[in-house]
Image: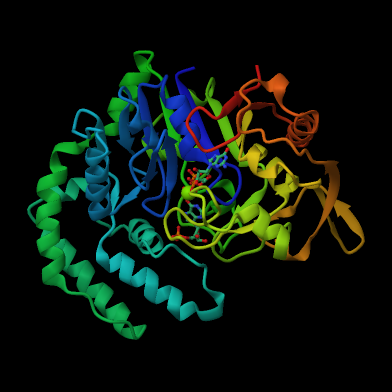
Amino acid sequence: MPLQIIVGTQWGDEGKGRIVDWFAANSDIVARYNGGDNAGHSVTVGSKLFKLHLIPSGIIHPKPVAVLGNGMVINPRSLLDEIEMLHKAGIQVNPDRLRISHAAHLITPAHQALDKAQEAARGKGSIGTTGRGIGPAYTDKASRRGLRMADLLSADFFEHLSVLVDDANQQLGLLGAPQINLINIIEAYQHFRKMLLPYIADTSLEVCSAMAAGQRVLAEGAQGTLLDIDHGTYPFVTSSTTIASGVFPGLGIGISAANDAEVSGVCKSFQTRVGSGPFPTEVFDELALRLRGTGENPWDEYGTTTGRARRVGWLDGVLLRYAVRINGLTELVITKLDILSGIETLKLCIAYRKGGKTISDLPFGPSNLEDYEPVYQELPGWLEDVSAIRQWADLPQAAKDYLDSIARLAGVPVRLVSVGPERNQIVSNS
Ligand code: GDP
Ligand code: IMO
Ligand code: MG
């Protein structure tokens, strides 16, 4: 299978990074196709915890080439910090191992300042963005005035940058937010230009050529299905196409590659969300603390990018089935099964109820979820610690029953289950 797509089935943070790391061992290219440093993908290898925001999680393996696709919005400062972090951890990132699309868009401090000022202006209706400038950068892209990686090569780059910064200052003025300093931005970009030029490439050509030569490409989705700009819980979404089909425009791959692609949906064994927006199966109080953790462990439910406490709840099977359809998933990977150990009774949302009617498909997608009440199936939990288990047969019967119920509800098989954050804490269903 030359193309495998890894995508989140929920509101992000499903554990995509560690699952990409698992599959990357057998991949030639690992490529991001959407988003920017709003993503935070954790990979734990022994005592080392890597938190990646822009560079695909496959970089930790020695073989795969990492690609930042044209569908991304890239903050050069974050990228250089990440390259530095990897160097310090003994992972060499050079232009042979990292390729950046000439058509990926640049995030500047103007975008970050606008993101924060727009959020402040929304007041109670704020989206809870990561403040990384993602929305404003995609706005410039859609307005056809954004700066792209290849523009770093052009003679009038700084003129173009100045116009965008002046314009942002006008908008910031209207929003009552502080102005940003053009001179500082120009100085920073002179440095970024020098550092990044060797990495810029026609990544579409490189990825397609690799696939034509039979190499394996692993596409790493950022965010999750329910944060997709079209198919998510709009307007509480991010500004990019997060779903699997975003791979084709986001990497510049022809659609025929979809024919035999594997599309793996990563799904946490419960539900989480960071930021505002509807969440029908959300839980509070003691149970929430039980699922979220106190923050003592690195895997507790606190954002990898912003450190914010994640909202938590029971697994929502209606939304999972929706994710299977919208992405064309061929299989599921369930993460954090270990966190459910010791909960006496588990709840799985199998339908919604509204106005006395029970429904299993949303009439207008997931935007008006606040109108629906979840219908739960209760399943017995298990007491055993599962984190040392590596064989499917050794999982407690109640855990296997829970996984079977998820697969039945979703209509696709569960291929892998993770039982801890460490690279090898994976149980394969085969
Ligand atoms: P991503 O954005 O989808 O890559 O997910 P994040 O890295 O933001 O969040 C997932 C968190 O769960 C990270 O802290 C992971 O180390 C952790 N994690 C992933 N899989 C497991 C698992 O099976 N068990 C436990 N306990 N933690 C896990
Ligand atoms: P990964 O790849 C979880 C959320 C933000 C906010 C909304 C819009 O780690 O799964 P943005 O800054 O993108 O304009 O914010 O989307 N969000 C994420 N939530 N995981 C992510 O990425 C996210 N990226 C954005 O919290 O609600
Ligand atoms: Mg994350």
Residue in the picture at 22% in, 35% down: 93
Residue in the picture at 67% in, 36% down: 385
Residue 396 visible, this angle: yes
Give the vertical position of 24 relative to 132 (above or below): above
Q: Nearer the viewer, residue 207 or 307?
A: 307
Q: Nearer the viewer, residue 157 or 293?
A: 293
In the picture, measured across the screen, residue 349 lies left or right of residue 80, that is: right
Residue 372 lies in quadrant: bottom right
Residue in the picture at 19% in, 45% down: 150
Which colouring convention does the figure follow?
rainbow
Rendered location of residue 325, percent (x, y): 66, 38
Rendered location of residue 249, percent (x, y): 41, 39
Give the vertical position of 262 relative to 184 (above or below): above
Give the vertical position of 113 relative to 96 (above or below): below
Quarter placement of the C terminus: top right
Q: Nearer the viewer, residue 16 or 324?
A: 16
Rendered location of residue 347, percent (x, y): 80, 48
Residue 255 visible, this angle: no
In the picture, measured across the screen, residue 277 lies left or right of residue 48, that is: right
Q: Nearer the viewer, residue 110 or 13?
A: 13
Instruction: State the residue lying farthest toward the left.
Output: 155
Instruction: State the residue lying farthest toward the right.
Output: 356
Rendered location of residue 3, percent (x, y): 46, 24
Total number of numbered discs in the rendering: 0
Residue 97 lies in quadrant: top left
